[in-house]
Structure formats: structure tokens, C-alpha cells
Amino acid sequence: MIERIKDCICHPRSIGKYHKDKAGIVILTIVLFFVLAISVQAVRCFTENPFDEYSSLAVTSAIIQHGDNTVVYDAKENKLTGESILVDGSGFKLIILPTEEKISVGRDSINIVLKEEEAYIYYGITKVSKIAYKDIRMGGFHLGAVAMNSPSDTYNFRGFIDQILDSSKVYFQASTFVRGALMTFVYYIICVFFCYILSISINPTIDRRVRAKLSFYDGCVFLVGSFFSYLFNVSIIVYFALALPLVYALITFRHIIKVVIRR
């Protein structure tokens, strides 16, 4: 297996010698390369916070633009009181003390719903997280004072929003990872498909099962390129990696032609 992996990475002309591999070996090899490709992606996704200091700043700015209101958070009682308001921001919606049983949320945005004693985060219409105010360690604030740029109220409000957003961190990290892993797999299948098509023009006499098998092996170099793309956080590497399987297929199937002629 080690030699097979080494040939898939460094010696495409030797890939043809694995034409008798069983489906289980091919699948295992692909899985190993795929796990390699997404391992660094997983580390990066689950160690980076999807929200930064500008997230709570954006919410605070929206409150300032909304103007004066009567909403007050009592840190001792862990309770939010005041009027029901809706604040539309860039990429998010803040819904404070909703009066309707069915909350109207934006479908393509992050929706922060602040109820009397707990907060919810929705992404579109999907409820992502919930946090009780008693679990938030932050001082009280008056949104009217926040709208007037009161330093203490603004500081407490931003910390309050930060902790609410943080409650949904795992969901967005997992969502980013799953999308990235799925995209990597789709790109890999596309690479295999074009390797298969290219191999037909190079050597149309090879059995289609063997052709598919070798194309899957040639496509593994894309997964290696994807690994380095996430390792160094340089997305342009992916575009170079997309072309590599075609180069490998060219070398692999041309070498097979030479072997057939020699025999």
C-alpha cells in the first residue's frame, strides 16, 4: 500500500502496474487520500472562530443607526425587558423581544433572536443554537444608551452579543467543514471524469474497468494538492491541483501504450 501511495503521488508512469487491483484496494486508497486532504481542513475549520470582534461591532452599529429604544438588560435578574424591535443589518437580522409566536426570520442571513430570558441563533430558518442569559457573564445595559454611544453600555452589549454568537460557533464550524469536504470530493470526481475522457483519446483499447481504476488513481494527486492548499492556506494551489490529474493521466496511459507495443 505504501508503494501504491508513493506511485500515485510521485510516479504516475508506474500507476499502470496496479491495473489488477480489486475494488476494495482502490476504494481504500481513495479514502486514505481523501482523509489526508480533509484532515488539515478539519483542523483549520474547528480552530478558527467564524465570528470576530467586527461581528458584535456590526450589531452594535445597527443598534446605533436604529436610534433610541427602551430595551434594558438586567444582569442581576438575567432578563431583557422593553419594546419589541427589529433591526436589519448587513447579513444579519436582530429580533428583540418578538411578540409573535412564529418568528419571522431572514432566509439568507444570520438571525439573532433575543427573548426575555434566552437567545436563539437561526441561520435562515434553521435554529442553530440557544443560550440562557443566566449562562452569560456580562454586565447590564440599556440599548438607548448604546444608541447614544455610552462606553459602558456599549461594552456590555458587545460582550453580550459575542457570547450569544459564540454559542453557535460549533454549528458554523461544522457546516464550513462539511461544505469544504463535499466540494473537495466533487472536485475529485470531476478530475477522475476528465482523466477517463482523456485516457480514451490516448489509448482507446484499454478495458473500461481498468481505465476507470487507473483514472481514480490519477485523480488522487488532486487530493494531495488540496491538502497543501489548506495546509498553507493558499487557495490558488487548488486550481493547479485540478490540472495535475490530467498530466498524470497523460503520463500513465502513454506509458501503458509503450508497454503494450513492447510486448
Image (cartoon, grey):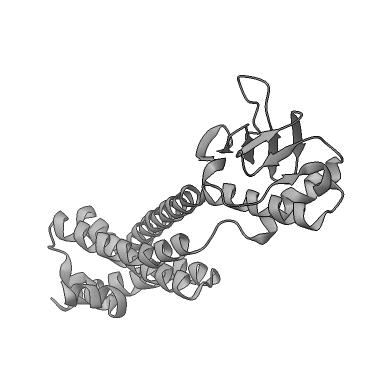
Whether residue 205 is visible: no
Q: Residue 204: x, y in percent? A: 29, 59
* Quadrant for the N terminus in the image: bottom left
Whether residue 38 is visible: yes
Which residue appears at 32% of the width and 61% of the height? 34
* Quadrant for the C terminus in the image: bottom left
* 2 shown above or below 140: below
Asked which quadrant contains residue 241, the reply is bottom left
Horizontally, residue 37 falls left or right of residue 230, namely: left
Horizontally, residue 150 falls left or right of residue 107, namely: right
| Count of all numbered marks drawn on residues in the image | 0
Horizontally, residue 77 falls left or right of residue 147, namely: left
Q: Which residue is situated farthest in the top direction here?
A: 101
Of residues 106 and 24, the one nearer the viewer is: 106
Horizontally, residue 103 falls left or right of residue 132, namely: right
Which residue appears at 61% of the width and 19% of the height? 101
Q: Residue 184: x, y in percent? A: 42, 57
Which residue appears at 63% of the width and 38% of the height? 111
* 200 shown above or below 244: above
Of residues 195 and 52, the one nearer the viewer is: 52
Which residue appears at 83% of the width and 47% of the height? 145
Q: Which residue is situated farthest in the front direction here?
A: 76
Q: Residue 66: x, y in percent? A: 84, 40
